Image: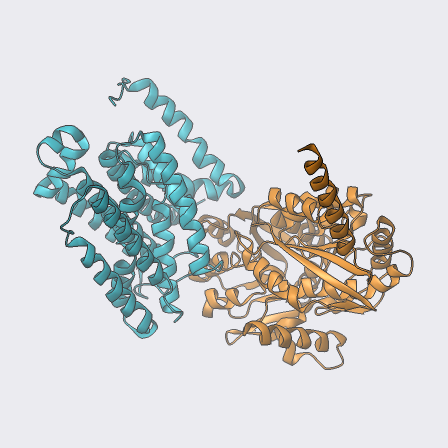
Amino acid sequence: MLHKRLIATAALAALGTIATLAGNPAFAQVKIGVVTSSTGPVSLVGIPQKNTVPLLPAKAGDLKIEYISLDDASDPTKSVTEVKKLISEYNVDAIIGPSGSPNAMGVISFVAEAGVPMLAPVGTAAVVLPMTEQKKWVFKTTQNDDLIAGALVAQMVKTKVKTVGFITINDPFGENWAKVFGELAARNNIKIVANERYQRTDTSVTAQTLKILAANPDAVLVAAPGAAPVLPQTTLYDQGYKGKMYQTHGAALPAFLQLGKNKVEGTILAASLMLVLPEIPDSNPSKKVAIDYIEAYKKLYNAVPATFGANVYDAGLLLEKAIPVAAKKAKPGSKEFRAALRDALENTKEVVGTQGVYNMSAADHSGFDERGRELITVKGGNWALLKP
Amino acid sequence: MNLQIVALLGQDGITNGAIYALLALSIVLVFTVTRILLIPQGEFVSFGALTMGMMQNGQPLTVAWLLVALCLGACAFDLYDMWRTSRRRPSLWLPAKLVYAAVVAGVALNLNFSTMPMLAQIVMTLLLLVPMGPLMYRMAFQPIASASPLVLLIVSIAVHVALVGVALLVFGPEGARTAPFTDASLELGSLRFSSQALWVICVSLLLIVGLFLMFERTLYGKALRAAALNRMGARLMGISPVFAGKAMFLLASLIGVMSGVLIAPITTIYYDSGFLISLKGFVGSIIGGLVSYPVAAIGALTIGLIESFSTFWASAYKEIIVFVLIIPILLWRSLSTRHVEEEE
């Protein structure tokens, strides 16, 4: 009996060794983990991101890339579990994701501890600012709020807006906008005469908009992501507000046009060039990349991707450039390779993405400049470039 | 803050409060008859609103498959019960359910409702969604009808969670918003009332009066009240608790879907919006001690008004203000009512 068991154990052990060897193939292979929220409340953002995974580059230099895509169900706790799983079980070299800002904030310490670079396609600038020892491992493939706010405030100054009513969603996205916009407005002598909050699931924002109306501002800025920015604007429209309406890049979605219909006509927002691609001059380097992405996505899903998907696509492009650089220093799968990958990402120069050009530095892990935003307006129920 | 703002806030509060009142009523209805706290009540609201939205956007009404699935499920339960109790003669309800599901699903999936008049859209929404109530009761609650309220509550929560998931699958994460019933608006001096708000208030009043008449004047209503007051006694008088339960769920889903249809033009409803709305209706019904209809309705209206005014003063703390208010009310209730042990 004992012998039999010993033999069985030995056989199993041998098999195990072979399996481990097989899992470590002779040709080098890079493993990238992707965590998206393809179910749950953030899925409006997460679904196009998950759908983008098959479009990501399959090779970087002469290294093959394997993607492991997991769903965190929009739950920040589950994001942590999935990220830990990717690091310890799959031994990934880098992580793309998670989709939601709170989810990304929650996993920073874990990726930093494991020394795995993470490319977060999230809105909040807080994942890379202010730069700390932990956030060194995090890169962000969306425009920072201050870049968007800067464009909006510049437009307000140009059109002589003196007073602004501000309404934003009651979460980290909204808090960061309140901070960024408040500072920029104060610097440009624009007075915020009403500062209101609301929830995504609110059935009525009448009380907040009444307060804004009572203050009678020249313009109103709504800051919220997804389909949420529609309600304050339509309520203001119904109450007869005649001033200018501003939105952030959070509204840059088909749902905004569809839900708002004629009530959002003339809204001004700053967002990625993807919305107004046909109007962008061919000289813009991102135009070609964006068209390629949209075409590939359309071919696969028969639908136009939201900009959120493009943020994951850009993460793929950044990795494609950085992996060969890092591969010169160490072998994929090792701690040294991941550190080299982080350094390579931080030294990204002039990488053209779908929504702008990335120039990373030790202080700036988002890397966008003015080429990463366009002033857009709603014209005839569609997005249009705002002509200066 | 001038008189005009007070009037507008009042209008907003009453409009929302009317919906909360409807939901509070149906939560009380269901609880008194079946001892089930109907957590999924809010899902009827979001399903109603989102189905209307799908129709008006000309999207295929995939929610019809949910009705088919629920009908098939309920029939499977019926057949299992027949086999277990060795009853040979099938009830007529079984084929009737299947025919109903097939006809309604066939109509829903093959016609384009986006060009039809609003009334046809509303009727179709009701036909599709209202049967979900009794079917849900058949599958989730009837087999455990005699279980303790705690077990019923746990199942109720499970049904809620499942329905939210189904809603995401069927309707997607985008919200929906529908066209108002009528475009007119009423001008009273410097005040402007949107016609939809008036619709909400009028239909809510009609439903409340209709429920009152049904419970006071009809035999079925009286039978259901009897079942609510004393379940054992009602059963001895030949009132079937299964029928009472199904009837209550039918009413609850009718009220819920109607509420969803009513508020869809005012706001954006998401697949997960229902819970917060029904939670406020629930607070209203708690104020009524889960037994009193008029107190529950007044409580829900008060919640709507408090919500509206507290939002005006401190929008960031609105939800906290509304829910913190439950504490003194619960305190008052527990101090003022005599505790009676529930007999099991």
Residue occupying the point 59% across, 62% down: A246
B310 horizontally vs A286: left or right: left
Q: Is residue B282 above or below residue B52?
A: above
Q: Is residue A272 above or below residue B236?
A: below
Q: Nearer the viewer, residue B334 or B104?
A: B104
In this rendering, does residue A354 appear at all? yes
Q: Tell me the colour chain B is drawn in.
A: cyan
Residue B76 coordinates in the image, percent (x, y)? 28, 51
Residue occupying the point 61% across, 49% down: A174
Look at the image and tell me in which quarter the C terminus of chain B lies. top left
Q: Is residue A382 above or below residue B285?
A: below
A340 horizontally vs A1: left or right: right
B300 horizontally vs A130: left or right: left
Q: Nearer the viewer, residue A317 or B242?
A: B242
In this rendering, does residue B305 appear at all? no
Look at the image and tell me in which quarter the N terminus of chain B lies. top left
Q: Tell me the colour chain A is drawn in.
A: orange
Q: Nearer the viewer, residue B46 or B312?
A: B46
Rendering quarter of residue B151: top left
- Residue that extends furthest to the right in the rendered view of this protein: A329
Count of labels in the image: 0
Residue B270 coordinates in the image, percent (x, y)? 45, 55
Residue occupying the point 49% across, 56% down: A232
